[in-house]
């Protein structure tokens, strides 16, 4: 059947109550002759409801139903470029000639007979991030089909193979290196280790090397003789002391001899032909060993339960890349015969694509993965049987929790006192998942014994860890794979939660589930923001398990609160600098000490920004500066990645000048009370916490009369015309008088340019505030600045006067000299 110019696709709709973990297992889109043998094979759990016990009992019932659920007319599938899509919705929502959509999508296969073409349009919608599969008709004689195979860990792909409708897919690994590891067993109890290798007799000299994961040194090396192989497979039995399942290490195959790898020799930079790196329970090989032997991949994590029979592993993934421990699965050993690989235990797409009238789109912020939505750690009464943890997926759809773990931490030893695997479970149709006590209404999907969740100081953390419990491969508090975390406390237990906060929610104070806020029971509810490990998004609210959170409304913002002064411990000026942020607003008076201490680990950087936000749950982030919650802003950095989004400041900044102060620390002080987010309101000065700020004063003024060249590229490109620099300020205007509106903006911009120009010469803290006593005019193409420059002190006034005498371009008879052609046009 000839390829069509426009993409065609087949939508197979499922009933709303069907199991969502359904995959397109096989597609035969173009069989020989009459196109009457084409088919689409689906694979799903035939049981109506998977059991909620151990995952192994569920997956043992997983099978592909051989009988097709519906008969299609001849030639339902079409030759490439085309796609087959599987949706979770009523069939009435999809019809002929409709546009391709990802709404309700469960699975899709996009294929093409040649590279490029219309397949890319389909792939961008149905399988974003993946190219269309190239169906090569020359691979096999006769008929062939595209079969879904597991490549490595949770990554699926397609392979061309002989058609196998109603049977297991014929997933075979691609042509490998000269020698590969096919099976192995890590010893447990009294059992010996075992390695089976696949290779050809003409592969040359080969050596099997065992690496110690603690020392990165050779523990054993053996010469291999593939002439003794049976069916291309060579079995090697190894003493139990060299391949222990309770330790970390590696098995590798090299070209060479055992004499090239003597025992206890260090890790060799020579690349192996194949390698398998593994982590024992509670141990992990070094990063150097892992990245040398299996670059870009992770070690295989062994189960925490040591088995008497050891750990039998077989190569079952069919990834085209080599040296990947993720291609091995636990399976019965089959020495000398093909591997007996189990059916894959994971779905290629854990969640339906968001969409439809009942589900919101994924938000543009956050990581789009599971979040902790609500936590009730202390229910009323002595029974402690009403506590729960509620999770939520931002897609708002039914989503698989395969590979997700919930860990409960105690603050005393910073170790998980409970690790809960959520594999085998799904969220509700609205994205919620509830773990809690049996008496909860509605009933939780996973029941916990009474008093399981401690009252605090403790933490709840959510991880994605497909290879096993997070604590098995990471010491202390795990951080790799962390999706979200909440650290909470009781009254008077702030200090006990500090260590957990520092690791899981750095720079934040632990939450207090305050029983005095509400009558009866209460919970910590996520009320705004989908950023993970963000405690500012939570509030004390009434419990709402499996329902939308009931969040309190914030009070009106306080009037007149602004940033008043900022000091960093890194602005030293040869002194001991204390960092602080001072706010200005009613009431004007306060105690002598700080009103609130910085959280542990928090510090004001050498270059950065300070934001003042107001909202009960909003997060004060540079990425959301246009948010209405932003009240004030101070930027003290030239970094363009920080300045570019700061439209509120005109893209300008204030940089502290230590020379402005003769001796002692330096700070940035606000000297115009009511111009929020304005760099022209700030200047360098000596710190004055809990006191009136030091600002430029006429008591320390100095007289200047200067003619300045072009201050900006805009001026330089307009035939050296400086008239635009004085549009907002009339000649002779003094004492900082300003016109309103657009002219006032130009005035502040011009003052900022002049202040920057002068500060480059002085490096002594000249800000736009210092120019409030000056006048400006445009004369003969020059910008003339004359009058009084204000200063903070005699010290700063002396520095300014010295700068004028050394660098100033004074006027002659009160008039700037005329410009000459080429004076500013030349390279010099």
Image: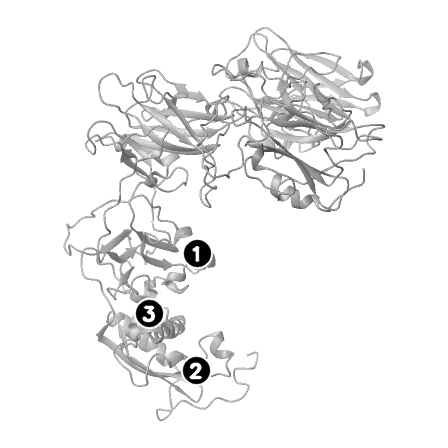
Q: Secondary structure at mark 3?
A: loop
Which numbered disc, 2 or 3, marks the residue closer to the eye?
A: 2
Distance from disc 2 to disc 3, alpha carbons, whole Å, reads 21 Å
Pinpoint residue 151: horizontal percent, then vertical percent. Answer: 66, 28
136 horizontally vs 619: left or right: right
Question: Which residue in the protein does label 3 denote?
Answer: 767
Count of numbered badges drawn on the protein: 3
Which numbered disc, 1 or 3, marks the residue closer to the eye?
A: 1
Lower position in the chain sequence, tag 2 or tag 3: 2
The residue furthest bottom is 813
Question: Which disc is residue 706 wearing?
Answer: none
Pinpoint residue 663: horizontal percent, then vertical percent. Answer: 27, 62
609 horizontally vs 84: left or right: left
Lower position in the chain sequence, tag 1 or tag 3: 1
Residue 236 vertical position relative to residue 422 in the rendered view, above or below = above
Residue 153 vertical position relative to residue 687 in the rendered view, above or below = above
Q: Quadrant of residue 152?
A: top right
Q: Nearer the viewer, residue 670 or 535?
A: 535
Question: Which disc is residue 642 wearing?
Answer: 1
Is residue 251 something that shows in the picture? yes
Q: Nearer the viewer, residue 119 or 684?
A: 119
Distance from disc 1 to disc 2, alpha carbons, whole Å, reads 30 Å
Q: Residue at x 34, y 47 (%)?
A: 603
Question: Which residue in the protein does label 2 denote?
Answer: 722
Lower position in the chain sequence, tag 1 or tag 2: 1
């Amino acid at each position: 059947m000839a390829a069509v110019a426009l993409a065609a696709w087949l939508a197979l709709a499922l009933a709303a109550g069907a199991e969502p973990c359904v995959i397109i297992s096989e597609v035969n889109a173009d069989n020989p002759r009459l196109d009457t043998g084409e088919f689409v094979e689906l694979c799903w759990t035939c049981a109506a409801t998977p059991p909620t016990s151990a995952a192994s009992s569920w997956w043992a019932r997983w099978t592909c139903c051989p009988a097709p659920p519906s008969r299609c007319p001849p030639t339902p599938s079409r030759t490439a470029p085309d796609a087959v899509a599987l949706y979770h919705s009523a069939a009435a929502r999809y019809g002929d000639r409709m546009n391709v959509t990802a709404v309700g999508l469960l699975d899709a296969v996009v294929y093409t007979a040649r590279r490029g073409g219309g397949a890319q349009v389909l792939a961008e919608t149905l399988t974003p991030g993946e190219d269309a599969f190239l169906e090569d008709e020359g691979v096999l004689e006769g008929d062939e089909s595209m079969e879904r195979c597991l490549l490595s860990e949770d990554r699926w792909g397609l392979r061309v193979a002989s058609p196998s409708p109603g049977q297991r897919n014929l997933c075979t690994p691609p042509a490998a290196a000269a020698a590969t590891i096919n099976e192995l067993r890590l010893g447990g109890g009294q059992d010996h280790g075992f390695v089976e290798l696949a290779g050809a007799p003409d592969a040359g000299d080969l050596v099997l090397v065992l690496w110690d994961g603690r020392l990165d040194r050779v523990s054993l090396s053996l010469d291999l003789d593939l002439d003794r192989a049976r069916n291309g497979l060579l079995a090697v039995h190894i003493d139990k002391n060299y391949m222990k399942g309770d330790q970390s290490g590696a098995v590798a195959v090299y070209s060479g001899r055992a004499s090239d790898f003597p025992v206890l020799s260090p890790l060799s930079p020579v690349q192996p032909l194949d390698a398998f790196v593994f982590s024992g329970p509670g141990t992990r090989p070094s990063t150097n060993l892992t990245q040398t032997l299996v670059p870009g991949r992770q070690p295989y994590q062994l189960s925490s339960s040591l088995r008497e029979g050891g750990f039998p592993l077989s190569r079952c993934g069919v990834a085209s890349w080599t040296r990947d421990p993720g291609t091995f699965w636990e399976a019965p050993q089959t020495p000398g015969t093909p591997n007996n690989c189990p059916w894959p235990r994971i779905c290629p797409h854990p969640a339906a694509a968001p969409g439809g009238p009942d589900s919101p789109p994924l938000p543009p912020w956050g990581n789009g993965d599971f979040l902790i939505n609500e936590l009730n750690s202390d229910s009323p009464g002595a029974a402690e049987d009403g506590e729960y943890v509620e999770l939520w997926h931002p897609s708002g759809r039914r989503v698989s929790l395969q590979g997700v773990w919930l860990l409960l931490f105690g603050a005393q030893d910073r170790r998980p006192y409970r690790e809960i695997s959520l594999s085998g479970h799904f969220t509700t149709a609205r994205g919620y998942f509830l773990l809690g006590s049996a008496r909860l209404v509605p009933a939780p999907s996973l029941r916990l014994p009474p008093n399981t969740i401690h009252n605090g100081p403790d933490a709840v953390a959510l991880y994605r860890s497909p290879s096993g419990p997070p604590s098995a491969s990471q010491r202390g508090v795990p951080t790799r794979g962390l999706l979200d975390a909440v650290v909470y406390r009781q009254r008077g237990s702030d200090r006990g939660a500090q260590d957990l906060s520092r690791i899981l929610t750095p720079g934040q104070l632990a939450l207090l589930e305050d029983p005095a806020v509400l009558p009866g029971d209460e919970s910590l509810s996520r009320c705004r923001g989908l950023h993970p490990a963000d405690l500012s998004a939570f509030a004390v609210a009434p419990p709402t398990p499996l329902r939308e959170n009931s969040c309190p409304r914030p009070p009106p913002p306080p009037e007149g609160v602004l940033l008043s002064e900022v000091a960093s411990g890194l602005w030293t000026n040869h002194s001991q600098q204390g960092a602080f942020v001072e706010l200005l607003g009613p009431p004007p008076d306060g105690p002598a000490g700080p009103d609130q201490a910085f959280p542990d680990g928090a510090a004001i950087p050498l270059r950065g920004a300070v934001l003042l936000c107001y909202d009960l749950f909003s997060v004060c982030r540079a990425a959301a500066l246009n948010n209405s919650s932003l009240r004030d802003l101070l930027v003290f950095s030239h970094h363009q990645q920080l300045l570019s989004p700061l439209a509120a400041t005109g893209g300008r900044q204030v940089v502290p000048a230590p020379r402005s102060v003769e001796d002692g620390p330096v700070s940035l002080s606000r000297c115009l009370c009511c111009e929020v987010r304005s760099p022209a309101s700030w200047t360098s000065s000596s710190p004055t916490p809990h006191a009136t700020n030091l600002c430029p004063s006429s008591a320390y003024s100095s007289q200047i009369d200067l003619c300045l060249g072009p201050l900006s590229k805009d001026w330089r490109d307009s035939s050296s015309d400086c008239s635009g620099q004085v549009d907002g300020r009339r000649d002779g205007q003094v004492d900082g008088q300003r016109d309103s509106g657009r002219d006032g903006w130009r005035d502040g911009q011009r003052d900022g340019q002049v202040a920057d120009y002068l500060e480059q010469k002085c490096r002594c803290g000249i800000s736009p505030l210092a120019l409030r006593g000056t006048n400006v005019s445009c004369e003969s193409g020059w910008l003339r600045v004359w009058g009084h420059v204000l200063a903070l002190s005699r010290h700063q006034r002396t520095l300014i006067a010295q700068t004028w005498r050394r660098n100033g371009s004074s006027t002659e008879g009160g008039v700037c000299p005329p410009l000459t052609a080429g004076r500013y046009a030349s390279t010099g």
